Image: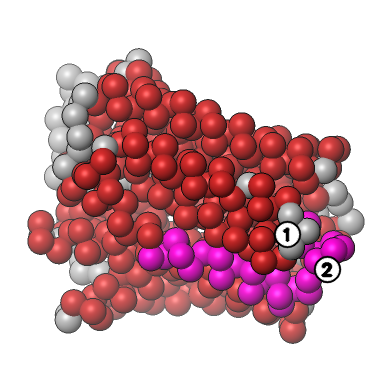
């Protein structure tokens, strides 16, 4: 397969795998009105998919060595279409929440197994471009998924939106059927001397890894807090944007599509600590702009938050692959769980701040999480004691490929 076509295929696979994760955020105001609940309640229900994402990551950490990559990805994407389609029935809010959790499990499983497959079945020369294409597709899903959801709801309604996304899930399974080769399960690794719980205890007692897990928690805490509740700000005066325009707002992710693949080079040149500081500083610089009455200023602030948090995520993820001294697969699973748990807590805590105290208090909470992330960067750099190489900085799965799991 030609290089450009191969990169496009990998990116499209990533897009179709996680497009459901954040697209629903763009239609939060419409869902809140339809269900007659508060923004915090609806924000928590929509972001409950992060619970499933965390559970799926831990499941792959536990059983990933035994799973056939192609079959696992296919089944995950095909099954994902079921809860997506059921959301179109507009079930009760608890059932809606449960279906979002089920979506998260399927997306996380397909995501982790695809990254494992790429780490195991691409040459050393092709690995960097393969992962760059996959992450770029992931970032693009944040933009195009939201834009699509807002457009469909604006023209066809809420039910049609979920039917469209269920079709995309099935399209992802079809793409995998034709593009991913049949492969045997990853070779079994003798873990008799290192039971899983022992490995997890080792990771959790490693100060550097604890700091990395906490950093992941804070990154998604800030990201979800920003891009969940800003929707309610934009549909109210003085902006009063319509549903279609709300989707267009998410073109603020375009700069991240360009900047995120550069993370590995920046870490190799300047080190983990400096890169994380810069990432969080960029995100912090966007927060005051989001309090402005100028629509252009708010968009600029959102773009800065997106660039900073995506870059920080690429940096922290790579650090986990380098800092884990044993069973890197379980380390990746723990990071994934912490990362998505941060998203759930962010939606709940910041939602309460938004409901009770307003948007300014919500932004202040986001700022606290970013500052804590900057402080944790000290632990990451001091723990490693060296600068990472360019290859593993951006591709944690290269370090984790023996365990068949990554984030």
Query: Does residue 63 show up?
Result: no
Q: Residue at x 73, y 59 (%)?
A: 231
Q: Mark 2 points at which residue?
A: 240
The spot of residue 43 in percent (x, y) is 72, 50
Q: Is the magenta stretch mostly helix, strand or loop?
A: helix
Q: Quadrant of the N terminus?
A: bottom left
Task: Give the class, few, some or many, for how many residues have Cα within 10 Å of label 2's Cα (few <14, many ≥20).
Answer: few
SS of the residue at dot 2?
Answer: loop
Q: Mark 1 points at which residue?
A: 231
- Picture mark count: 2
User: Which residue of the protein is positioned furthest toward the bottom in this rendering?
Assistant: 155
Q: Residue at x 46, y 65 (%)?
A: 255
Classify residue 53 as left or right of residue 33.
left
Q: Residue at x 86, y 51 (%)?
A: 37
Query: Does residue 335 show up?
Result: yes
SS of the residue at dot 1?
Answer: helix
Q: Residue at x 23, y 79 (%)?
A: 4
- For the record, the magenta segment spans 232-258
The spot of residue 343 in percent (x, y) is 58, 42
Q: Hey, which quadrant is residue 297 in on the image?
A: bottom right
| Circle nearer the viewer, 2 or 1 | 2
Classify residue 40 as left or right of residue 120.
right
Q: Hey, which quadrant is residue 319 in on the image?
A: top left
The earlier-in-sequence mark between 2 and 1 is: 1
Q: Pick the residue in front: 279 or 12.
A: 279
Q: Measure how far apart labels 2 and 1 are at the Cα level.
A: 10 Å
Q: Hey, which quadrant is residue 257 in on the image?
A: bottom left
Task: Give the class, few, some or many, for how many residues have Cα within 10 Å of label 1's Cα (few <14, many ≥20).
Answer: many
Q: Pick the residue in front: 199 or 44.
A: 44
Magenta stretch: includes residue 276: no
Q: Pick the residue in front: 362 or 196.
A: 362
Q: In this view, does 138 lie above or below 355?
A: below
């Amino acid at each position: 397969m030609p290089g450009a076509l191969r990169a496009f295929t990998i990116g499209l696979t990533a897009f179709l795998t996680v497009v459901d994760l954040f697209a629903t955020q763009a239609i939060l105001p419409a869902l809140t009105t339809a269900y007659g609940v508060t923004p915090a309640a609806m924000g928590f229900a929509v972001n409950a998919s992060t619970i499933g994402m965390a559970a799926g990551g831990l499941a792959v950490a536990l059983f990933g060595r035994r799973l056939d990559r192609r079959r696992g990805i296919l089944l995950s994407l095909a099954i994902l279409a079921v809860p997506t389609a059921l959301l179109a029935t507009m079930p009760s809010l608890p059932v809606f929440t449960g279906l979002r959790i089920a979506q998260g499990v399927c997306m996380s499983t397909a995501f982790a197994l695809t990254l494992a497959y790429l780490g195991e079945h691409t040459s050393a020369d092709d690995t960097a471009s393969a992962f760059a294409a996959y992450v770029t597709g992931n970032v693009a899903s944040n933009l195009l998924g939201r834009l699509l959801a807002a457009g469909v709801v604006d023209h066809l309604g809420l039910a049609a939106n979920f039917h469209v996304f269920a079709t995309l899930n099935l399209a992802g399974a079809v793409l995998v059927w034709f593009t991913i080769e049949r492969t045997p399960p990853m070779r079994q690794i003798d873990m008799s001397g290192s039971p899983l719980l022992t490995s997890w205890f080792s990771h959790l007692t490693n100060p550097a890894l604890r700091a990395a897990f906490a950093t992941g928690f804070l990154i998604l805490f800030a990201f979800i807090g920003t891009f969940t509740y800003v929707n309610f700000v934009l549909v109210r005066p003085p902006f009063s944007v319509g549903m279609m325009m709300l989707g267009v707002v998410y073109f603020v992710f375009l700069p991240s599509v360009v900047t995120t693949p550069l993370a590995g080079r920046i870490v190799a040149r300047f080190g983990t600590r400096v890169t994380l500081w810069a990432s969080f500083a960029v995100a912090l610089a966007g927060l005051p702009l989001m309090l402005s009455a100028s629509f252009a200023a708010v968009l600029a602030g959102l773009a800065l938050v997106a660039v900073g948090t995506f870059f920080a995520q690429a940096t922290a993820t790579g650090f986990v692959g380098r800092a884990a001294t044993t069973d890197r697969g379980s380390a990746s699973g723990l990071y994934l769980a912490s990362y998505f748990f941060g998203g759930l807590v962010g939606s709940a805590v910041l939602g309460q701040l938004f409901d009770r105290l307003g948007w300014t208090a919500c932004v202040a909470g986001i700022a606290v999480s970013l500052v804590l992330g900057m402080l944790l960067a000290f632990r990451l750099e001091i723990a490693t004691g060296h600068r990472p190489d360019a290859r593993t900085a951006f591709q944690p799965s290269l370090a984790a490929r023996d365990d068949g799991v990554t984030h």
